[in-house]
Amino acid sequence: MLDTISLEILNILQEKARIPNIEVSRQVGLAPSAVLERIRKMEKQGIIDGYEVRLNPERFNSAQVAFVHVRTSAALSDKVGTALSLIPEIQEVHFVSGSDCYLIKIRSADTTSLGQLLQEKITTIDGVLSTSTETVLSTIKETSRILIPKSV
């Protein structure tokens, strides 16, 4: 069970993962060693799953975002999901309810490279029956932050 101080630490780290430990300790009113101990404990428990850098996709020729619904044969659905997860341009693979089996998020350079990816890597996977693609015109909000309650 997480107390309010641990929840506050998580909120701080979600906002700025590279914040110095001493600054976190100032904000929550604990000694730096106590904060570090709490962080390591939450890492060990799997509450903190890792740290990552957010890159500007435009700087890496990956500004085009698309969401693709992938319909699969029932017998090969798991294998399709695994194959999709191995394609580097695919950022997210979600198994969903409804007539489609997977919803995937893709980043590519442009619609031409998106089309090539669909034709050469996705529709050629054994078990993929069809795809339906929605390209993103602009992104209003994109975050990996999780809403942390005041108490758990």
Image: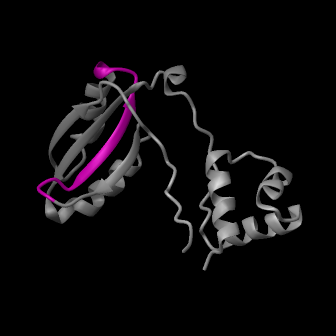
Q: Which quadrant: the C terminus?
A: bottom right
Q: Residue at x 82, y 50 (%)?
A: 23
Q: Residue at x 77, y 60 (%)?
A: 28
Q: Residue at x 27, y 49 (%)?
A: 103
Does residue 67 appear anywhere in the picture? yes
**Residue 132 is one of the magenta-drawn residues:** no
Camera-side residue: 26 or 109?
26
Is residue 11 rendered to the left or right of residue 71?
Answer: right
Does residue 43 appear anywhere in the picture? no
Residue 42: quarter of image: bottom right
Is residue 116 rendered to the left or right of residue 101?
Answer: right
Residue 54, horizontal then vertical, whole percent: 58, 37
Residue 7: quarter of image: bottom right
Q: Residue at x 47, y 21 (%)?
A: 61
Residue 106, horizontal then vertical, whole percent: 36, 37
Is residue 127 rendered to the left or right of residue 121?
Answer: left
Please say if 59 is above or below 83. Answer: above
Residue 4, horizontal then vertical, whole percent: 65, 70
Outermost residue, bottom side: 1
Which range of residues does the magenta coloring cover?
Answer: 98-112
How many numbered discs, if any?
Answer: 0
Camera-side residue: 148 or 130?
148
Residue 58, horizontal then vertical, whole percent: 49, 21
**Residue 105 is one of the magenta-drawn residues:** yes
Q: Which quadrant: the N terminus?
A: bottom right
Colour treatment of the image? one colour
